[in-house]
Amino acid sequence: MSDNKQGATFPAEGGVREGSLDFIRQALSQGCFDAVLIPAKMPLSDSFAYALIEDESLLKDAYPLCPIMTVQGARVISALTRRGKGKKVLSAWLRPCEVRATVELSKLGQINLENIILISIDCPGVLPLADWAKEPEKTESAFSELVKGIDIEGVRPICQICDKFSATGGEDLHIGTIGMQDSLLLIPNSPKGRSILDNLGLQAAPDISDWQSQVDALTADRKKKREQAHKELESRAKGLDNLLHTFSTCINCHNCMRVCPICYCRQCFFDSDNSKFPFEDYLVRAEAAGGLRLPPETLLFHIGRMLHMSLSCVSCGACEDACPTSIPVAQVFSLVGSKNQKAFDYVPGRSADEPLPLRVYQDREFEEVEQSGARAPAPEET
Amino acid sequence: MPKVLRLNQGAEEGVKELLKFLLESGDTRGVLTLTKVDEGGGVAYSLVTDPKVLEDALPLFPLMPVNAGKVLSRITLIEPTDKPIVAVMKPCELRAFAELLKRSQGSLENFLFISSTCGGVYPLKTAISENIGEKLPQYWDAVKKGEILPEVRRNCTACTQFIPYTADMTVALIGNSDIEKQCEIYLNTSKAEEVVTGMTGEVSEQELNTEALETLRSRRKVQKDKLLDEVKDLDMEKVFGKCIGCRACSKVCPACYCHLCFFESPTSEHRALDYERELSKNGGVRVPLDTIFYHLVRLFHVSLSCVGCGQCNDVCPVNIPLGAVALKTAGAVQEAFDYVAGRSIEEELPITIFKPEEFAGVE
């Protein structure tokens, strides 16, 4: 967190939702952006989806914080800008993990951020998609209770151990709500964000310490929870046998990959011709072990996916929500992701300027390999 | 009159015995069957080559982790097997494979198919939250009596095609009151008669217990009407509006065989301008586009070959009643063409046949 952060307050007597919508209305009318991308309740249904809204009257169905995550926001922005930026300037109202995934996708060339203003908001987490699918009304009312506090049970397991639920660095503007009474704290983090405040005539003041200290305390608490959860999970999932057990109910539907914001490949290796074999190959493999599980490569798929995306995994939990057999995919991936990210001192989504570790080549890396080759007979040095 | 092989043991044990016999004594090189893959209860299809591994086989287990038709398509897509293989699968899986064969997605060469009269399968969600093993006595009791177990998949409660059409062998389960002690395997083809030669058991001539089957069929018909009624005046926008676009329904569907779905192709990658055009028209637009369109087109594409297995329904993360919708549209489309998906391997797909007089009709 930078020390020179400033923030402006914005009235929200009617609560976070009303305050946020008022802010959007003002910003729209002042021409800060042309349209807003925001979760909205679909008029004909009890469902939520991202909607791009220009007509102010449609904002009545918008939910800056909606109870569930239907399509991960980064995927939504990718759908909008993968083929290039549009003419209009859009503000995208996202959860912090969606902002982080958006930043990662922009580094991967799947998103054009030029005409997009990323706005994040302190996130209480979301409820499991399955709960909502069963009892939409109950889930919605549970969530409105949840928004009043910030750290309660009932949100998805992955949200319960989330330590990046607030400003995470990639956003243009962050909306602080934690500990705020009847107001929102608008914290700009880029020239785009600052210009919105300027346009609205809002004065950013340097004292945001009340909010910051509460965020810091909760972050510390969540970090502890996360470490603890990872430790427990490791004891259950580490090693081939445990992994096989963890993924034993996988039906190979690849839905985790399909909803993952980071899995952007047009064609997954595991759906490609590379993973289709002549019958004889299957038989040979079956004969080697007495039997071969089909479809094959169930675990290999997960390990391969892990290898491909775990450096950019933002622990959003979309994978786990979409798994038809309730495998704790997101928790396993968050465990592996945080270890890999630590090894590269990389935090996905922290900054759009920070290059992806595996995309950077430094001459001295090669030297290191050469030297280690020369030193090969001295294992005690490794 | 058809021949039947009678084994003096429970149905599942009997089938396992048969599989063992085929692997040990004949030319059979492999067996595709549901198998226990994990002590925690995981059940999956496996290609078993070692008779010892067959001890973990659960050939009649009431679960469909994947539609076996899709599995067979995948492993025979590139080339047929030149070694004899036996596959134990449910009637709708067999029908699915028949449809895939017609669409050049696999080969049945050197396969011998064992199926059964089918009591249905439990939803995948039941398999992960409860122990199906503990439910089996209740399941088999319903099968014996030819009753509908309400806990099986909704599509299974409404399935009237629970007798396999194209199996070499049919294990008689529905209405078999001695299911724990007697295994009755109908030998439908000469190939079937041939391969069981030498097996301990009594071969006689007998008809399937049609009374129990008819009773079940009429019970299932009642359920089917009920299920169809639920989606009678379906508001597509409302029901499909819930969709999160994960495409799980397509990924697990045996009739969805396209290697690249239209909706994942560049044609469906819209430009920012496409969204902005919608925006100027309506003031708001859902992103991504095509949520409902996807479902309508999928129904359009699959309904001729849909076997009503209900796999789509089981994997939907937001509980869209895809199984019932598929049953309704597939039923109507197949009826219009007097076609039943998977009824026969030889019967051609209606839309692949061209008759000159059709053209005259249009003119």
Image: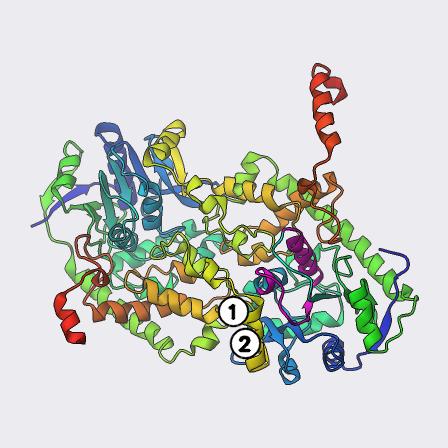
The residue where tag 2 is placed is B278
The residue where tag 1 is placed is B289
Q: Work out whether B75 lies above or below A284.
A: below
Q: Residue B200 versus residue B225: which sits nearer the camera?
A: B225
Q: Give the alpha-carbon distance from disc 1 to disc 2, as whole Å.
A: 10 Å
Asked if disc 1 and disc 2 are in contact, CB closer than 8 Å, the reply is: yes
Task: Please state which of the two labelled residues, at mark 1 or mark 2, is closer to the viewer.
Answer: 2
Residue at the spot x=52%, y=55% of the render? A258
How packed is label 1: few (under 14 Cα within 10 Å), some, or many (20 or more)?
many
- Quarter holding the N terminus of chain A is bottom right
Q: Is residue B206 left or right of residue A105?
A: left
Q: Dividing the picture into quarters, in which one does residue A259 lie? A: bottom right
For label 2, the SS is: helix
Q: Residue A166 versus residue A246: which sits nearer the camera?
A: A166
Give x and y (percent) for residue A73. Answer: 63, 63
Q: Work out whether A318 lies above or below A228.
A: below
Q: Chain of mark 1?
A: B
Is there any visible trace of residue B53 in the rendered image?
Answer: no
